[in-house]
Image: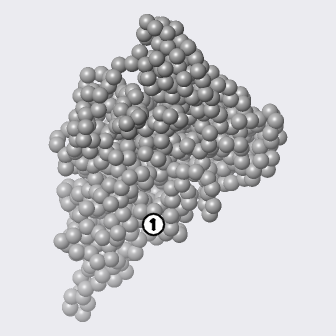
Amino acid sequence: MFGTFPLRRPGLWADDPLFRSAFNVHKNHIDHESERPDERDISPFRRYNNARSSGYDRKPTFVDRGTNPKPGKGTHVQCLLSTVANANGWAVILTGRLQRKTEAVVAITTPPDCIVGDWKLTIENVVQEGGKPVNYKYEIKTPIYVLFNPWCKEDDVYFDSRDLLEEYLLNDSGVIFNGNYKQIGAKPWFYGQFEDQVLEAALFCVQRGFSGRYGHQMADPVRVNSNDDNGVLVGRWSEPYVGGKSPMTWNGSVAILRQYLQNRKPVKFGQCFVFAGIVTTICRALGIACRTVSNFASAHDLDGSVTVDIYWDTQSGSVLKDISDQIWNFHCWNDVWMRRKDLPSGYGGWQTIDATPQERSEGMFQLGPTSLRAVREGKCELPHDGPFLFAEVNGDKINWGKSTDGQWYILNLDKTAIGKKISTKLPDGKPVRSIVNSLDVIRQDITDEYKYPDESERERHAVIAASRASLRKNNVYNNEKQQDVKITGFRDRDWILIGRNFSVDLMVKNTSFQRRTLEGKIICETITYTGEWQAIIKEHSFNTVIGPNAEGEVSMQVRASDYLDRLTEHASMKVSAMLKVLETGQVESWQDDFLLRKPELNLEVSSEKVFVGKPFECRVSFTNPLSRRPLTGCSITIEGPGLDSELDYPLGVIEADREWAAILSLTPSKPGRRQITVNFNSDQIRDINGATDVFVV
């Protein structure tokens, strides 16, 4: 008779779209059907049976949280059964009787600062038996789940745009951006916050985050979001993935959370985009508006200096990797919307949280919540973790060299290298139809929410303010030197298809009135998306002369056979160059990252309109881009309507230059617009994604 059901705090009388259609109490509870599947099973009341009593007046009721509820902790509440709502506190309200006198319908209201989580309801009744009062207690076995309420103005997570909540709370599918800032890619992701067991898993994560200690802190969204995920995922950033799944093969959060809830052990394996996808699911399930964010050219500041320091060996022309900060091609985290009562006025709104384990904060692998406005203004002294986030999105990149007397000096300083094209899904409340064509129709650039335009006066003020609040002891901005030979960059070689040859072209400019002799080295390496060097695939030493006020170019050829056996999962490459001007002793350095383009995974459905309970076909096709090599160990992972979990299919071998195609049969179980995602992996090329959507009626 009873099923799990969530309440949003406070009062269920708020004009909340999840609940406002539920007030035809009995009929709605039994018969209500909604076009939105997440509404159909959510209601603010439940029937209860009490065969011992036919009276209803002023019965004491108790609502308890946890195994040892206490009034002082806010985990034990006593109130009287009433017919009048309490707009600001707990109330159990008699809203109607059923046909039998032993049944009644009640609604429950909660205060806006109620502890989130599962509560149990006990109703005490006093009846006359033989002229004497007798106490009976009835405990409803099914828990009541209390959630945050972004539609309620008194709740700390209140969000004033109903249209945007269609995306940030109610959309159960989306996309996570990856690649690099010049070659942005997209991975479809099924959040599935309304799927079976997901809410239970989300609340279990919150409970573990507080080590099972129930109290007022579980009512505060800042505290709820400040705990790490306590082991939902095991992070691993490179192969092998023994004992688990490659992070590339996950298409959504549901399978991960179900496995975690069932086994109570971390799921293997995740990377930043998986952590971020899980956090979006958990926050939306709990009632907190949340978006998944991708930051390109994302710095990892190891020492709290809020700069990104790269140290070069000026003799060998290579980077000293053990002591240099890292720059990730992209990094994913989450923004959540909430008030910040612990900060000065005006610093609420979007707050960044990051579940990916990088650096410890307050003893745990966590970041945030960090106010986006505080980061934009360089106010890194405000809690929490401002310096680390500031460096990720707006740190200056400093290249260092060591002189013959052992002193470090600045080779050059790049004020625009870090924090590019910070992206999230366009908040239209719809699933993603395709990722094959232009991503501009599904991507929203939110860089200006994190920082002012690079090198603008306000941005420079923020950088200086952040530097003063950092751990750096010296002012590097007084040490910049003007040099007459400049590396202007590498010629773009973006979107080179995997399996093709390419060249690396270093461009140099001489601004002096004399000719300059340049001696140096170019190195091309494979890297992970986190900037970890994997293997040198080609290096080229050069000696060339460039005329006065002239530009020059140095090239290095790379063949497919140089890199095919050394590619990483994201097909990421880094090119580095260092040169020395023989006439002046000047040393100059430069780095750039690029991706090799993966082939497209195409999805076509037999009809854009399909029906619940009736199978439809989806064609998946893919062409091996390698002209001389077969793809081995091929497999696809599918997530879509009607699938209780992700499905993995082994495919075997796809011959060189051949197309592979398959017809999938899917049977949807829920109405609405639904997203289908497919992920392809092989031994040679990994993480190729495709998506489409269907309308289920």
Left or right? Give the position of 207 relative to 689: left
Q: Picture coordinates of residue 543 (x, y %)? A: 58, 21
Q: The C terminus lies in which quarter of the figure?
A: top right
Please say if 91 is above or below 463: below
Type of the residue with mark 1: Gly
Answer whether residue 156 is visible to the viewer in this image.
yes
**Residue at 78% across, 40% down:** 661
Q: Quadrant of residue 465?
A: top left
Left or right? Give the position of 391 relative to 574: left
Q: Which is more toward the observer, 574 or 539?
A: 539
Left or right? Give the position of 504 relative to 57: right
Please say if 319 is above or below 645: above
**Residue at 71% across, 43% down:** 565
Please say if 42 is above or below 317: below
Colour scheme in use: one colour
**Residue at 65% across, 37% down:** 537
Q: Picture coordinates of residue 148 (x, y %)? A: 32, 54
Please say if 77 is above or below 226: below
Residue, disc 1? 3
Q: Quadrant of residue 121?
A: bottom left
Q: Which is more toward the observer, 84 or 96?
A: 84
**Residue at 72% across, 48% down:** 683
Q: Which is more toward the observer, 209 or 295?
A: 295
